[in-house]
Amino acid sequence: MRISTSQLFDRGINNILNGQGDLSDIQQRLASGKKLLRPSDDPVGASKVIRLTEELDQIKQFQRNNELLTAALKEQEAVMRNINDAVTNARTKAIQAGSGAMTPESRAAIGVEIAQIRDQVFDLMNSKNAAGEYIFAGYQSKSPAFVYDPSATGNKYYFQGDEGTTSYQLSPSVKIMGNDSGKSVFEDVFARFKSNIIGSTATDASLKISEQNDLDRFHQQNYDAVTPANNSFQIQINGAGNQVTVTNTGTGANLGTFNFTSGEPFTFNGMQFTIDGAPGDTVDFSLNPPEKKNLAQTLDDFFVALDNPDIPQQDFLTALDDAIIGMDNGLKALGAATSGIGGRLNVAGAVFESNLDLEIASKEARSVVQDVDYAQAVSDLSRQETALQAAQATFSRVTSLSLFDYVR
């Protein structure tokens, strides 16, 4: 077999170029720390690296979402805590105002404090987040959640946002609500349930709510929003004058028979009746339609009662009861919303930790496929340098084997 001079040169140069290429690859791996410089190095491994990188990018986005959610919830929680403190202070003032030693001037002074707390609560209900959006306005976050309209015929403080909420994706299967609508937290709060006498054939009859919780249960179980007639009841004194029977005049249902003494009070589902009557007399009463009032409106109604020096004592006591029950209901709704935030924060924290574990596992799996083994790479570098030097030396010796080297 004859080998031409050009073939000798071509083969020698190819060996040197291949050696230089292999050496360059090893140097790049050492410099970059990556074992895979191109997909052709390991197609299966390259595909796995792409998939793991996508998972890591997704986890990174989930963690950013988690941080945004946590900040939003903590901000909302801080606002609710301040409202709770303000309303609790107002409730203390209300109890103080109920003292029999209070003069109209003293009540007016408490009224000034209640007005300040009302304004504070109203301002907090319209709190903004760091982006300048109203926290409790739902999707209408560019406008105040609550407005004050002094000319309104009903509630002067009312909600004008919507029930929209923003959710954050924290993992492929976990999505958590990042805000509460002011409608659910503040607006959809029932005022005090009431009942009143609407007719009587007795000489005298009065009704006083003695156990609000009992009346609340009775009202919730029996109030009929569809058929108003079913909200009317009648008390009738029996023939012997020592018992009364309570019936629902709309449905005809008998609600029970109770011992009775004329002029002495008796209680029925939290309502204390005092009837001065004879056998056969009747007293008709009804459940008032339920009302909803936010905390700012409840405080404003109480301020009006405190600021009126001519208000009858009984009317003031009624306004006081309305205020205390309204604040209690508002605090209960606020507490439920705050508990919900706490629960969501706990879930967010647990998901955050879980994502950290997944991130570490994915990075380790990607590192096994992608990252270079420095000890092995250094050894390969030394071996490849030796191979290249041998190729260069061989090329020098082989290309000198020519007859022209001897014709001199």
Image (cartoon, helix red, strand yellow):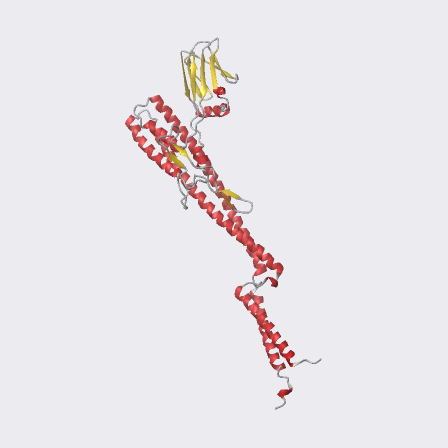
Q: Residue 5, can we see it?
A: yes
Pick the residue in front: 3 or 279.
3
Point out the residue furthest to the front here.
151
Residue 321 place in picture, x, y as percent? 39, 26
The one nearer the camera, 165 or 281, is 165
The residue lying toward the viewer, choosing from 313 and 28, is: 28
Q: Quadrant of the N terminus?
A: bottom right
Quarter of the image where the C terminus is located? bottom right
Q: Residue furthest bottom?
A: 408
Q: Is residue 116 above or below residue 321?
A: below
Q: Is residue 87 left or right of residue 399?
A: left
Q: Position of residue 323 (x, y in %)?
A: 38, 28
Outermost residue on the right side: it is 1
Q: Does 6 sit left or right of 27 as displayed?
A: right
Using the image, determine if residue 72 lies above or below residue 159.
below
Quadrant assignment, res 35: bottom right
Q: Quadrant of residue 369?
A: bottom right
Farthest residue to the left: give it: 105
Query: Residue at the location (56% across, 56% down)?
Result: 364
